[in-house]
Image (tube, rainbow, N blue to C red):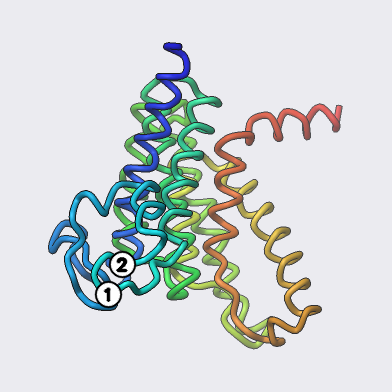
Amino acid sequence: MSHWIVWGSVFILGIIIGSFLTVCIHRVPNGRSIVAPRSACPQCGAQIGWYDNIPLLSFLWLKGRCRVCKDSIPVRYPVIELVNGLGYLLVVWRFGFAWDTVVYAGLFSVFWVVTWIDWDHKIIPDVITLPGIVFGFLCGALILTTGWVNSLLGILVGGGFLLGLAWISPYVFGKEGMGGGDIKFLAMIGAFLGWQQAILTLMVASVVGAVIGIGLLAAKVLKKGQYIPFGPYLALGALIAMIWGIDIWNWYFRGLV
């Protein structure tokens, strides 16, 4: 019974923070405060009471509609909450209960926020990545097994590689190939996870992005030359690197022996 209580508590914490993430995703790109004012219905402006702001449950109780104007509540809100809760379970399953886990759980939430913001607005805000690089370096040096040298190399390799790609893209492809937000985001990932995982992140993101891009082109959902946000693929690659990166690298090098 105590086992289920612990895991249930982790999940509840995850969905509560996930509810806060919905606010961040909505307000950060617009430069608005994530603390005040209180959440309100985007259609009628009515403030949302605490009883209508309970993660997952309020959406079900209200049947996906605003209590006041009865307009539909986007299903993305409970999805964001649910995935964050499941993500916290994944992090605890992988790393156990330690300070590392707290950092990695927070990093998962950052990945999730960046995914939605970049998908919606085609930007990755500096207010997330620049402090994230500094905080990632401090965590890498003081808390995580990354170490300060590996963390510093992660910043240089992650950010430097994409910066170089952005610099040569106009000459090779005739257009900008990488946004500044992507560069800073991968530098932030490298700060937390180190240079090897930054490389793995980029490899996974490139492969997944290429496969999905080709699929969208084939389905004529995407037009040739149309921009695809790269942040969600970097976030997915970083998640895989964070959870399974060491195992992937060990498997790869064993195959070379």
Point 73% across, 59% down: residue: 207
Residue found 55% across the figure and 63% down from its top: 162
Q: Image check: 181 left or right of 220?
A: left
| Residue 89 image position (x, y, % from top left) | 49, 32
Report the disc number at residue 66: 2
Q: Identify the image quadrant of residue 209.
A: bottom right
Q: Which residue is disc 1 drawn over?
A: 69
**Occupied quadrant, residue 46:** bottom left
Q: Quadrant of the C terminus?
A: top right
Q: Which of 223 and 133 is in front in this view?
A: 223
Outermost residue, left direction?
37
Kind of residue sitting beneath label 2: Cys
Number of the label disc, if any, that sits on residue 190: none
Residue 144 falls left or right of residue 35: right
Q: Answer above or below: position of 192 versus 235.
A: above
Residue type, mark 1 in image? Cys
Image coordinates of residue 48 in percent, x first then y, are 21, 61
Are discs 2 and 1 less than 8 Å apart at CB?
yes
